[in-house]
Amino acid sequence: MVHVNIFDTTLRDGEQSPGVNLNQLEKLEIARQLERFGVDIMEAGFPASSQGDFEAVKAIAKTIKNSSVTGLARAVKSDIDIAWEALKEAAEPRLHVFIATSPIHMEYKLKKTPEQVMQTAIDMVSYAKKKFTHVEWSAEDASRSDLDFLVRIITKVIDAGATVINLPDTVGYTTPEEYGRMFRYIRENVPNIHKAALSCHCHDDLGMAVANSLAAIENGATQVEGTINGIGERAGNAALEEIAVALNIRKDKYPFTTNLVLKEIKRTSDLVSRFTGMKVPGNKAVVGKNAFAHESGIHQDGVLKNALTYEIITPELVGVQSNDLVLGKHSGRHAFKDKIEQMGFELSQEKLNEAFQSFKQLTDRKKEVTDEDLFAILTDIQTAAVDIKKYELVAFQVHYGSSNLPTATVALTTPEGIKVETACTGGGSVEALYNTLEALVKEEIHLTDFNLSSVGRGRDALAEVHVKMTVNGINVSGRGSSQDVLEASAKAFVNAVNRVFFNQNTVLKEPAAL
């Protein structure tokens, strides 16, 4: 059995998904869960892209001990220097440096000759090796690169100190047969390839990212890169949970092992979905809500007689519990603390007290509190910034009727601690509420997206709202949950505005894509 390292880039390539805007606390929580999931390497971000990304990468590098933390850098000395400052306190710091190698990228984007690109790659890998023990070098757009040029440049960068060679399908163009053949060719023609690991990194523009990744593994790749839920730029990246389960279920076809803890898949997927605001489609493989649902009478009959007739993956394998009704109004603090520890949360005493109070308030309105309800409460509290100036919702009221003009009254406290109040109208109750909130905040607001969903099932389920907006020209997202749809909407609006105060990102460079 050949071991395959799992390289997770949810916090870097995944966060480059349009509309995704994670703050440092959310990134830290995802990083802790990725560590529990068992990823070997996590790409925490692109430190040179912004001050916020630098600080987040630095915090993750200091926190994570059981996974190797890496950061992305262009083939530029300043990027490498900034990455080192962010990563030097990691348990096992490593660098991921890249440069494009396809003819179209070299000519039109880099405006360099192949020889110039090769020399830059050699120089920057050599420079990085002086700081980092592990240096991964990526040939951006490798799948559209000349194979003989790849052989030459890979040979040189391995001599310069690269310990991992990544061959990305940057634009999701290749097919499994072509991608596998490229890895086989490199393995057979690069004379010093035994000194470095081969890695694959696939995008899903043609829906083949997972298939291409598996083809690379079959042809010598011992590291696979991807994201949770397959999020990422454009159509996204290879979904790591799908690769992990495919390797497990089809051991007859794929004699490879990983360090992933499969029962952590569902929790990891839910956490990433909640923080990014990117809902998992119902028919998504492995983690979609319909992945283990059977509507056809023939299917239902077969499953009742023997689950293996139509289920090749058991829900328990990926951490889906058949019964998650856990706590009620008579549950005490000890039972609550045990439950949240079982769910993998580590809360300070202050946040534990806050979470317990929120739980008790919820039990006054709901007879049964599910894992999903607790997950919503705990993630909100765990990622709440307590030591920044921000807007706080004091109270609101909305008057609405079929024959009346919707009117909202809202009271807020400003970041300066001043209580303000006003009322506005709108075409609907949510619009009236948002018009009022916008009138109270000083910032310039432009709402670009509003999404409402339920947490759990039943008429008493929590409502969860995700919004995307620009605040003073900065793209941000926000979320809020409550049993009341309008309260969840108000919380999401205020949460989005407050992100500007928490994560003042002065963008230095545009993030890069592989």
Image (spheres, grey):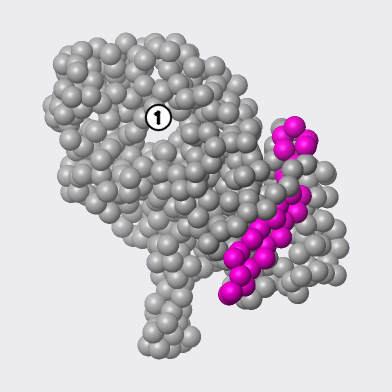
Occupied quadrant, residue 397: bottom right
Relative image position of residue 160 (x, y in whole percent) = 32, 14
Q: Which region shows up in magenta?
A: 392-418
Q: Is residue 152 visible?
A: no
Give the residue displayed 54% in from the left and 17% down from the top. 85
Pick the front one: 206 or 201: 206
Occupied quadrant, residue 461: bottom right
Give the residue displayed 64% in from the left and 40% down from the top. 441
Relative image position of residue 95 (x, y in whole percent) = 44, 24
Give the residue displayed 83% in from the left and 50% down from the top. 353
What kind of secondary structure does the magenta stretch mostly adopt? strand
Q: Amino acid at mark 1?
A: Pro
Left or right, 247 with reference to 446: left
Left or right, 296 with reference to 55: left
Left or right, 446 with reference to 497: left
User: Mark 1 highlights which residue?
Assistant: 511
- Residue 249 versus residue 120 in the image, above or below: below
